Image (cartoon, rainbow, N blue to C red):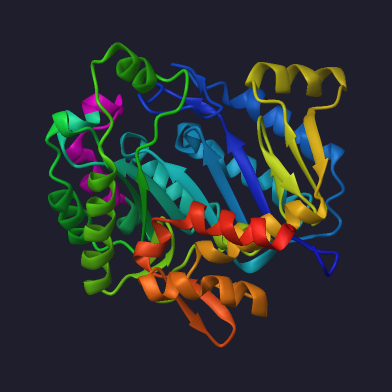
Amino acid sequence: MTDGVMRHLYIHVPFCARRCSYCDFAISVRQDTPVGSYVESLRLELDRLDTSGWALDTIYLGGGTPSRLDESVGDVLRLVRDRAAISTDAEITIEANPDDVTHSVADAWVRDGVNRISLGSQSFEPKVLEWMHRTHSADQIGRAFATLRQAGIDNISLDLIFALPESLNRDWAADVDQVLGLHPEHLSLYGLTVEPHTPLSRWIDRGDVDEAPEERYESDFMLAHQRLGAAGFEHYEVSNFALPGRRSRHNSSYWTGASYVGIGPSAHSFDGAIRSWNVVAYTDWMRRLDSGYTIVAEAETLTGENRLSERVYLGLRTIDGLRATDAEIQLARPWQDAGWAEIRNGTIVLTATGFLRLDALAASLTLAGSR
């Protein structure tokens, strides 16, 4: 927030109808979404904040499953509009599950200012969706996409998960082809990771499922990189692809180190010097707001080492690259020789194969810079 203006707002909506097999996010599984109490708690949190310096360029409703709010997404956005300035061309995104998208709901979202949807598709194979514990069917993905288009949404992102266990016999190439057939503006592709205390973790501990080998992770990643590139998509961040001019403005703000505010349970905020995050549990967050207690779970002031680590890691995540020192460029020469990076006018830019080695390369630079 170098100019004193806050431009990015994240709103965490924790509700889900079911926990996916791989999910360790801060969610609240509810058959009936308590919309009224959630919106009231958001109001209480916003009233604690000084919004006079907000001129929002992006608003992102993530989760959880924000589409579980249905038409009450408008109530959430009105809370923000009543307290803060929003740019006329602001990017306003909502994450949605295909089974939540109806014509009336999509029309309401558009009326209330939503202009970008992130649709959680994950796969087009019924057996895979069932294994993931997804609540939507494969057919509902295409129907939801068409409904959003009819409502006037011309900026749609879809999510897919790759590197699934070999036992599923998932046809990754077919999934990539099917998502391209819908002609979205943006795609987010994530390799399956095993998080503790998830159904997937328990399956693996019991020996019911084996993780995909590293070779499968790399082959899936490179197949997507090549096919999406051939279709005109820019692989602009490790997990994200966009048609020209359609990068996610909100997520890009994180990767450039911009300040942001997060509201809702477990939401993180960053003012350029201090990072803080709210309590995780929805009921705890709500009770604290009702009782007047703090909802901030913890806060940390970034040290010089933190800043170095984040500058390197965030810089290497995108094709805009890391603006590097002479010493960093010298350290990056072997990566260039291996085909993992390119050095362009003092900037280190990772290739697709370099993205696969991001953590190791970032750690090497950070370690050298901290000596």
**Extreme-top residue of the structure:** 206
Query: Could you tell whether 107 is left or right of 221 in the image?
Result: right
Location of residue 101 by image quarter: top left
Q: Residue at x 58, y 26 (%)?
A: 35
Asked whether residue 155 is in view, the answer is no
**Tally of numbered discs:** 0
Return the x and y of residue 328 as percentages of the image width and height: 62, 72
Q: Nearer the viewer, residue 73 or 97?
A: 97
Magenta stretch in the rendered image: 130-147
Q: Which quadrant, please, contains the N terminus?
A: bottom right
Return the x and y of residue 153 as percentages of the image width and height: 39, 59
Location of residue 245 by image quarter: bottom left
**Extreme-bottom residue of the structure:** 345
The secondary structure that most of the magenta stretch takes on is: helix
- Tell me if residue 140 comes above or below residue 199 in the rendering: below
Q: Which quadrant, please, contains the C terminus?
A: bottom right
Return the x and y of residue 300 as percentages of the image width and height: 81, 41
Return the x and y of residue 82 as percentages of the image width and height: 76, 49
Asked whether residue 347 is in view, the answer is yes
Q: Residue at x 55, y 36 (%)?
A: 72
**Residue 153 among magenta residues:** no
Q: Nearer the viewer, residue 3 or 80?
A: 3
Q: Residue at x 43, y 58 (%)?
A: 238
**Residue 140 among magenta residues:** yes
Q: Nearer the viewer, residue 361 or 319?
A: 361
Q: Nearer the viewer, residue 74 or 237?
A: 237
- Tell me if residue 288 comes above or below residue 151 in the rendering: above
Query: Could you tell whether 350 is left or right of 279 in the image?
Result: left
